[in-house]
Amino acid sequence: MTATATESSTTSVRSLVPARMDRLPWTRFHWLVVVGLGVSWILDGLEIQIVALVAPVLADPHTLALSTAQVGALGSVYLGGEVVGALVFGRLTDKLGRKNLFIITLAIYLIGSGLGGFAWNFATLMVCRFIAGIGIGGEYTAINSAIDELIPSKYRGRVDIAVNGTYWGGAAIGSIVGLFLFSSHHYVSLDWSWRIGFFIGPVLGLIIIFLRRSIPESPRWLMTHGRNDEAERTVDEIEERVRATGVELTPVDDSKALEVTEPPRLGLVEMTKIFFGQYPRRSIYGFTMMVTQAFLYNAIFFSYALVLSVFYKVGTDSIPFYFFPFAAGNLLGPLLLGHLFDVVGRRKMILLTYGLSGILLLITAWLFDHGSLTATTQTVLWCVIFFFASAGASSAYLTVSEIFPLELRGQAISYFFALSQGAGGVVAPFLFGHLIGGQNNSHVKPGPLSWGYVIGAVIMLIGGLVAWFIGVDAERKSLEDIASPLSATSRSESGAVTPEAAPA
């Protein structure tokens, strides 16, 4: 099972690393990966939930006295930071490795979020939120790359979707914390409540950063960066852990070997040519998946507290009670539907989840515009809509991560994440903040926001149709079969996909 090097004009390596990783059963090692890396989504959910809950608090004259537009801007600047972090660290994670980057990006997040608790005005809070966003944006690229490369192909879809869905576990934690911090009983003073909220994420991050140190570098990344011996040793260690539990591993046939050489160095122009030249339909597919879910989620999530307070007159201390079931529905969707993306298939499930959420949101928009909803029925509808939308949105990151060559995985995530956030994610919170209008206006009309919901619904329907017509059937396939590495020189197994011949 060890690799043999062959000499030609350039040095190439014949490796069984990908095949060995994909044939592994589920082990404690994989649980370590899920827990150690999946926390980044929990932290992001916690961060955005805290901002959503403190929106009315920050608007109070006894705190920072922000306007609704400024509250929306806080969400947008955080997402803008995510875009910058994804672009910068997406390139670095492909160049320097997955492990180095998921340690560095977590540290940046800890600093940015922690400092946010000391902000004294709108400008300083904006800066701190931007830094925290940079860290989380970098996390997305390194984490999704590492998870997809470390998890066996049989489980990759459900694991990636479930991990991305844990964002809502973080949001639920934030909601529980909000019951205490923003209670009308004032257990904590108003000015200190939101500051403490920004300290919670860094405390969790400090704990998890030590766990991440025991997660190895991706053997696939090592294999394609001239470190195949190290890659083989890493897989040897993982296999020893499996055998220690009494599980016998069958030998991997040599026909599954992949021959790779030194990866090409690509700039932004060359990378763009690969995306839209060799993989044009996949690029449209990936961009559509990312931009549709980004618009819907950022629009609803950043504004839901304002909707409850402005249209339904829900008090600040009661908002967490309404949000908790909403977060639970979002968490259950990926956990309960995730395995179907491996069993039923990617395209069918994306069409189903995007389509159902879009149709249900159209119904909600009509009911909202006609004044037929209460705070409770609005929350129930959100729970049902996002049970499906959450699974679909989580699959967007999986989609972009697995349909492009290994050497571009981190950059693909960052590239399409940045495009989607710029096209929909950053705009959505600011737009919906203006559609809601002033909090103190007792005559706010639902019409403008209803049209915002209609726009979100149509966008989701378009996303589902795009997946159905030009999506990729990537379920239960090796990453190298979906898209061969750019550094691959040959593949012994028949039917392997090359970049030039890769189906869209």
Image (cartoon, rainbow, N blue to C red):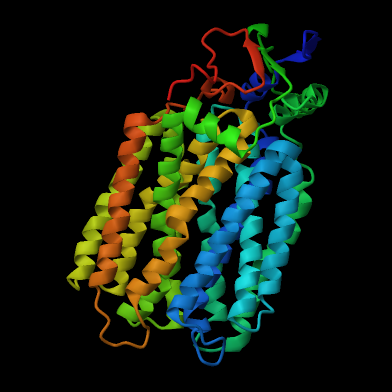
The answer to whether 184 appears left or right of 386 in the picture is right
> Which sits in the foreground, 346 or 225?
225
At 61% from the left edge and 68% from the top edge, which residue is drawn? 129
- In the image, residue 191 sits, relative to residue 129, either above or below, namely below
- In the image, residue 329 sits, relative to residue 195, either above or below, namely above
Task: Indicate the position of residue 21 as horizontal and vertical percent values.
Answer: 66, 24
Q: Is residue 139 visible?
A: no
At 43% from the left edge and 73% from the top edge, which residue is drawn? 321
Task: Indicate the position of residue 27 as horizontal and vertical percent values.
Answer: 66, 33
Task: Indicate the position of residue 194 as horizontal and vertical percent values.
Answer: 59, 79
Q: How many marks?
A: 0
- In the image, residue 2 sits, relative to residue 194, either above or below, namely above
Task: Indicate the position of residue 387 as horizontal and vertical percent values.
Answer: 38, 52
Given the current orientation, which residue lies at the most extreme left position? 370
| Quadrant occupied by the N terminus | top right
The quadrant in which residue 256 appears is top right
The answer to whether 133 appears left or right of 103 in the picture is left
At 24% from the left edge and 56% from the top edge, which residue is drawn? 362
Q: Is residue 171 visible?
A: yes
> Which sits in the foreground, 361 or 265?
265
The quadrant in which residue 96 appears is top right
- In the image, residue 468 sits, relative to residue 454, either above or below, namely above
